């Protein structure tokens, strides 16, 4: 049995075909070759076109089929991972009414703050586990307030993965996990929050059928099966946000286990069996992929918006003819601490760790006589790494204390400078796994179709490719560099 995993990322769409029995990837590819752009018509705005996600999804699947590495007729189930918190609004014909307001968009923060005051801090923290902030619910409120003509046409409110699933199957569903990441889910009542809907003036009819993450979300449409080279019996059997899905792909399912990613954004994600919340709303809690009312599994997420996107910005504007590997090699030529050059990477919208303030990215202490290309490249990687270490400290304040991290051997973790900077500054080892989001989505599909009896069984054969331990030889230098970096954090 083969399984297809689709990862709807910000930069591209990745598709992986997995041999279910061996839990190994037969083929992976991404589309487009160049990274997708984020449309920002005003400061703080961040949008992408869902129709373009769907186009890229089809192209990635067809690209994989053309490889000859597998027979697409052997694919039995599809799983979808997607960028979290994005707002997709559809009419009665499932047509997109406006571009998606994506995860790093900041425009709705003030509406979320007003909602938190009206609903009350106690209710938000104990029922929603979060302030509405600038999450999906607040983004929908922005459309209602600023684009009433569009709001009146909305028949369906979904997240990015739900939209891709509907394009494949013609069927709309959502899950407690997706609703929780939109801050629509009431954990105390185990239903959509009627209090939040009442405050914003949203009808519950806007939301599709709610069902488990691992379940039958619809059979592929005959015309889609023909177009994509699949059998007509193929079903979508799993949908999850990228960070819960990434945790699944790394085998992070139970309390005490910690996943981390460093793609466009950077995340440290722990699992708890308690309804945890942060008094300062700097880290956020959502229903994990294996969440059940009778067996609570809460994903506690610390997110830095400006991680890999900062490194991409550096490449596009200063090293356009270099590969990321060449940039990594350049960074390794500079000394720890980058000769005092500090980078604050917070230039991708409002940062939750600063209570939804827009901080902006910056270089600090730039010395035109001392800092060359190697220091610039290293300072960006150190700034990103140190921001994640700072986030780990915030997680510790809500009772999530990592003893060890798990990450996919991908994105920023391909850089020895970045990886060692995190490990040395946090004094925590990281296991780099042979896995990624698209593979996790495929394994999730295997759970949803019943091939695997449990999430734990689905990831039982995952392999550790490399382990990075703290290097005592450089511990003091890294600690000094991290302390210097923290001096420039906003109050």
Image (cartoon, grey):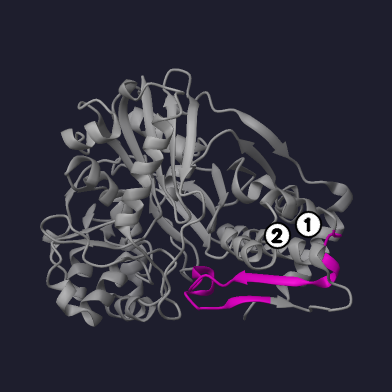
Question: Is residue 17 located in the magenta-colored stretch of the structure?
Answer: no
User: Looking at the picture, how far across and down is residue 483, in whole percent?
Assistant: 77, 68
Circle on res. 376: none
Image quadrant containing the C terminus: bottom right
Mark 1 or 2: the one toward you: 1
User: Does residue 340 belong to the magenta stretch?
Assistant: yes
**In what element is the residue under mark 2?**
helix
Residue 222 can be seen in this image:
yes
- The residues tagged by marks 1 and 2 sit, at their Cα atoms, a distance apart of 8 Å
* Residue that badge 1 annotates: 331
Residue 408: percent from the left, percent from the top?
58, 41
Q: In the structure shown, which secondary structural element does the residue marked by tag 1 occupy?
A: helix
Residue 215 is at least partly visible in this image = no
Task: Work out whether residue 467 or residue 102 is closer to the camera in this orientation and state it.
Answer: 102
**Count of labels in the image:** 2
Q: Is residue 86 above or below residue 427?
A: below
Binning the other alpha carbons within 10 Å of mark 1 as few (below 14), some (14 to 19) or many (20 upward) gives many
Q: Which residues are magenta?
A: 334-362
Pick the front one: 314 or 481: 314
Neighbourhood count class around disc 2 (C-alpha, 10 Å): few under 14, some 14–19, many 20 upward? many
Q: Residue at x 34, y 75 (%)?
A: 112
Which badge, 1 or 2, comes first in the chain's sequence? Answer: 1
Where is residue 2? Give x, y as percent. Answer: 38, 23
Q: Position of residue 135 (x, y in %)?
A: 36, 67
- The relative height of residue 6 versus residue 420 in the rendered view (above or below) is above
Q: Do the CB atoms of the residues marked 1 and 2 lie less than 8 Å apart?
A: yes
Nearest the eye: 157 or 472? 157
**Residue of label 2:** 381
x 67%, y 42%: residue: 430
């Amino acid at each position: 049995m083969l399984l297809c995993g689709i990862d709807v990322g910000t930069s591209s769409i990745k598709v992986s075909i997995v041999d279910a029995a061996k839990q190994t990837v037969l083929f992976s590819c991404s589309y487009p070759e160049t990274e997708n752009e984020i449309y920002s018509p005003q400061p703080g705005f961040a949008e992408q076109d869902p129709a373009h996600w769907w186009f890229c999804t089809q192209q990635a699947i067809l690209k994989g089929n053309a490889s000859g590495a597998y027979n697409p007729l052997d694919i039995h189930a599809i799983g979808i991972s997607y960028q979290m918190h994005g707002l997709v609004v559809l009419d009665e014909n499932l047509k997109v009414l406006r571009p998606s307001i994506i995860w790093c968009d900041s425009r709705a923060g003030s509406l979320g703050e007003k909602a938190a005051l009206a609903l009350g801090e106690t209710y938000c923290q104990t029922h929603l586990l979060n302030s509405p902030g600038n999450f999906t619910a607040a983004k929908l409120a922005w459309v209602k307030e600023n684009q009433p003509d569009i709001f009146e046409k909305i028949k369906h409110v979904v997240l990015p993965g739900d939209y891709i699933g509907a394009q494949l199957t013609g069927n709309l569903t959502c899950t407690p996990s997706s609703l929780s990441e939109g801050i629509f889910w009431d954990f105390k009542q185990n239903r959509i929050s009627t209090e939040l809907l009442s405050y914003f003036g949203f009808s519950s009819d806007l939301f599709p059928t709610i069902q488990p993450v691992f379940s039958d979300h619809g059979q592929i449409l005959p015309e889609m099966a023909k177009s994509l080279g699949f059998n007509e019996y193929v079903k979508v059997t799993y949908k999850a946000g990228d960070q819960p899905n990434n945790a699944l792909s790394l085998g992070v399912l139970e309390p005490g286990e910690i996943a981390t990613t460093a793609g466009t954004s950077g995340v440290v994600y722990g699992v708890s069996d308690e309804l945890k919340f942060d008094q300062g709303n700097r880290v956020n809690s959502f229903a994990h992929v294996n969440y059940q009312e009778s067996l609570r599994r809460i994903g506690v997420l610390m997110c830095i918006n400006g991680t890999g996107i900062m490194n991409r910005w550096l490449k596009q504007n200063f090293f356009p003819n270099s590969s990321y590997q060449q940039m990594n090699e350049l960074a390794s030529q500079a000394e720890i601490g980058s000769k005092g050059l500090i980078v604050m990477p917070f230039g991708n919208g409002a940062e939750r760790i600063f209570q939804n303030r827009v901080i902006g990215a910056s270089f600090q202490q730039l010395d035109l006589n001392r800092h060359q290309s190697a220091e610039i490249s290293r300072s960006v990687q150190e700034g990103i790494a140190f921001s994640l270490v700072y986030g780990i400290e915030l997680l510790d304040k809500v009772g999530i204390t990592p003893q060890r991290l798990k990450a996919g051997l991908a994105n920023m973790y391909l850089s020895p400078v970045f990886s060692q900077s995190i490990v040395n500054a946090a004094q925590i080892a990281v296991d780099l796994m042979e896995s990624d989001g698209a593979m996790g989505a495929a394994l999730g599909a295997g759970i949803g179709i019943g091939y695997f009896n449990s999430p734990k069984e689905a990831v039982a054969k995952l392999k550790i490719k490399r382990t990075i331990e703290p290097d005592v030889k450089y511990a003091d230098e890294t600690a000094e560099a991290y302390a210097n970096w923290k001096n420039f954090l906003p109050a």
